[in-house]
Image: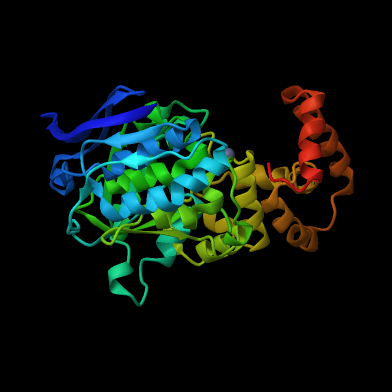
Amino acid sequence: MAVVIEKVEVRGSGSGLTRLVATLSGDRPGELFFEVEDRLARYFRPGRADGFVAALLPESAMHGGDIVSHVPVSESLLFQLNTFLCPVLGSVYGARKIEITAPPAAGNTAAAGAVGTGITCGVDSLYTVARYSCTPFPRHNLTHLCLFNVGSHHIGADDPREMEEFRTDLARRFCAQNGYEFLRIHSNVHDFSPRYARYFSVLNAAAAMSLPGLFSHYYSSSGCAVSEFHLTAVGLAHFETFVLDTLSTPTLKFYSTGSEVSRFEKVRALVAYAPGYGYLNVCNTRRRNCGVCVKCLRTLYALDILGALDRYGEVFDLDRYRGDHSRHLAECWVRKVLARDIFCRDLWPRLRKKYGFPWTRVLQETFRFIRSRLAIYSRSDIRRRLGDHNMGRKG
Ligand SMILES: [Zn+2]
């Protein structure tokens, strides 16, 4: 059982875009590609399959299928994946440890020294941009902000294509206004690796690895605190520093950024970062911040605590939030207690200190929450989830 990378080639489309295409056979026959504007195609290295191996790795590890590449793979990557990452993924997924075999690529590719990160304009990515643009270490300062279409646009409620267009426009404007180079990679990797939420760090790294001639450093904005580091099949993000270390090569180093601080501390840093005020976009379900989903509310709570709501009037409907303030406060308590939301656990004591306990609304919101959960989960599901919680497992 194996997926086989037969060959890798560069193909121009004649319409301003160029693809790096891997022809696959074995378990998953087909073509897997990364696509960039023509001007970036010179940074492709079709003599290496590093990015394709990374893109195929999580699903292969999950199903215990090997990866065989007839195209060379960087020796350090082959060594690290086979020695460290594959055994760990095998045990995490409860599958056999897979093997990656390929001719080891001799020597390292020379990179143009670009320093990149993803730019979704969410809290994590804006924090990375704010924090790593003007460090005292010039070769580590961000030069390129990227939007990789490797599956993230497929998890919201809006149409993936519209979601991508909206995010591209936002990122492009942010880059133009703040002096970064904007770079976009389109890929069909979600056809081969569809569970984006479970291994997005690897898919984004794979996209960066498709341009080995360009990047020397790449920051992956982490949403998980390193203090919560643990191995789990739920999401590789929970042990991202380890995963990214095994994907790094002598010429392309990945860093997991933002894991050293809490989400609240990130928002505090953003409040002092004026370029982000008109761009903050945290909603996963809608293109514009809906203001009522859990991701929007977590951010609004933090801005509220910090007394910084008015700086974000362009991106949030503040009248709506303030008009329903006591209900939103009660929701935070309910999410902390009943949904075991770790962000609300962090935010609630600060909200309570500022506004007190919204007694009347808490009861109402508790019933509303339980009703909404009963509509989604069966009673046995809920009992199981509570059981998991009591055993100290993370859901
Ligand atoms: Zn929202």
The quadrant holding residue 28 is top left
The quarter of the image that holds ligand 1 is top right
Residue sitting at x 48%, y 49%: 122
Residue 42 coordinates in the image, percent (x, y): 13, 47
Q: Nearer the viewer, residue 146 or 378?
A: 378
Residue 262 coordinates in the image, percent (x, y): 60, 61
Q: Nearer the viewer, residue 358 or 282?
A: 282
Residue sitting at x 37%, y 35%: 56
Q: Nearer the viewer, residue 328 or 219?
A: 219
Task: Tell me the quarter of the image containing the C terminus.
Answer: top right
Question: Does residue 334 appear in this view?
Answer: no
Task: Tell me the quarter of the image containing the N terminus.
Answer: top left
Residue 294 coordinates in the image, percent (x, y): 64, 42
Q: Nearer the viewer, residue 208 or 166?
A: 208
Residue sitting at x 10%, y 29%: 14
Q: Is residue 290 left or right of residue 273?
A: right
Q: Is residue 395 left or right of residue 146?
A: right
Q: Is residue 97 left or right of residue 110?
A: right
